[in-house]
Structure formats: C-alpha cells, structure tokens
Amino acid sequence: MDAIVYPITPQVHAVDDASIFENLPAQAVTVQTAHSWGGARRLVVSPVTLKPRFNANATEPELERAQQELPYAVNFRQMSLLAAAWTLGSVKYLAESGAHAVTYYETTGWRGVMETEAGPPLPARFPSAPGLLFPLYHLFFDLAQWKSARIVSCRSTDPRRVVGLAFRKGNACHLLAANLTVEPQVVRLASSRFSGASGRTSHAGNAPAAMNDPEFLAGAAKPQPLRRDKPALALAPYALSIIDLTTA
C-alpha cells in the first residue's frame, strides 16, 4: 500500500456553526491514529469538504431534489468567511499533526473557492455572482506563498474562539489567525521576539472588495501595524487575518 487516504467532512450528525468548529481538533487525532498503525506510509487526507459528497447511510437511491433546493453535497456557507475560518483550523490541525498532503474542495462553483463565469445555478439559495472569489480563495492564495516555509508551533489560549497557524522562513515569521465565533475577538501575541509586525484582515466590511481582487490580502488590504510593546489585533466575527513578523 503506497499511502493511506481518507476524507473529512464536518457535517454528518450536526450541521450548526458551533458543531463544525468544535470538531476541528479531532482532525489531528485522526492523523495521529492513522500514523500509529500506518507506520511510515504517506498519509493523505482527501478530499476535505464542507458537506459529505454523498449519503453514506442511504439504503436506496436518493430521489432527485426539487429544482429550487441545493444539491445534497452543496452548503451555502461555502462562499462565507465562516468557511475560510473553519478551513484555516482544518489546515492547522492536519498539517501540524503530520499529514503529508491534503486536498480541499473544488476549484470553481458552489463547492469550490471561486464562482464560475456563468454564476450559480440557484442564486436565491447560493447568493454568489459570476466570477466572484470566495474568502477561501484568499486563504489558499496566501498558503501557496509559504509552501516552502517551515511550520512552527502556534497555540491559542482559547482554541474554541481563535485559531492560528504559523510559518517561518529565515528571519520572517508568518501567522494566519481566524476568529471562530460570531463575537469580536482580540488576538494578543505572547512572543516578544520580533522587531516589527503588521496585519491584513479580511472581514465582512471589506468582503465585497476582496471578492473582486485576487491579491486583496497580498496588497490591497490596508496593513495594520502592531505595537511591539503591546501587540494586539482586533478580529471581527469570522475574520481572517494575515500577520507578518520580523524577528529581531
């Protein structure tokens, strides 16, 4: 056997927002368990989707849904900030626990990271528009810039509220943080071993601009300097922030 491969989805027994966030840490446990009996074999988590791709418990063919209902495998939250926040948590727990590779979602459409040029088939149920970039797009765009960096330890004092994933390359440290709640949160950096820091954030207020700019978080978003003596960043509900640190 060349590799161990299995999928992950957060919506099986419960589909509310709180439940899908609560199951994030368990993703790391699946990797640790698979490693315990898989040895040195490559471990691939694929695919990761917001909804199950099919009903694994069905005992007979599923009836075709009404034309005004979303397909079973589609979730309207795919285009939301919530999805980006959840996905950052998923990447964190799977990467830090030792998964060799992970496949997420699709490229375009209502199970992807951007809308198709034709737009969604059911805009009333999935309120997207032709060519829009989902918040997920900006998360993966940023991750791609740091794929050669080393993951470093990053812990949240309350992982139910805020999650973070950190990389290091030379003297540069890169941190992605997400608010997992509907309430504003303040992130404070416990480490003081840096000479400068600034953050760019995607939130509900600038989401329309981000959905039309593929490099929004890479340049268009206004950077927020962080004071070295009191490094703190305010995160709106489900906001995704990218923080660049320069170590001393």
Image (spheres, grey):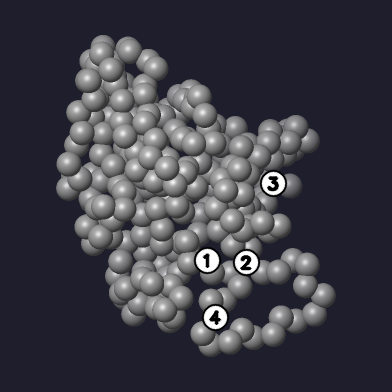
Pointer 1 with pointer 2, Cβ within 8 A = no
Give amino acid for label 2.
Arg
Task: Say whether residue 88 is visible.
Answer: no
The first of marks 3 and 4 along the sequence is: 3
Kind of residue sitting beneath label 4? Glu
Residue 69: mark in rendering:
4
228 in relation to 213, above or below: above
Q: CA distance from mark 1 to mark 2?
A: 11 Å
Secondary structure under tag 1 reads loop
Q: Amino acid at mark 3?
A: Ile
Residue 238: % across, % down? 41, 47
Callout 3: 10 Å neighbours few (<14), some, many (20+)?
Answer: some
Q: Which mark is residue 177?
A: none
Q: Which residue is mark 2?
A: 53
First-in-chain label (1 vs 2): 2
Alpha carbons under labels 2 and 4: distance apart: 16 Å
Write down the residue under mark 3: 4
Query: Which residue is found at the position 53% from the left and 44% from the top?
Result: 90
Q: Residue furthest front?
A: 183
- Which element is circle 3 on? strand
In this rendering, position of residue 64 left or right of residue 1: left
- For marks 4 and 1, the one nearer the N-term is 4
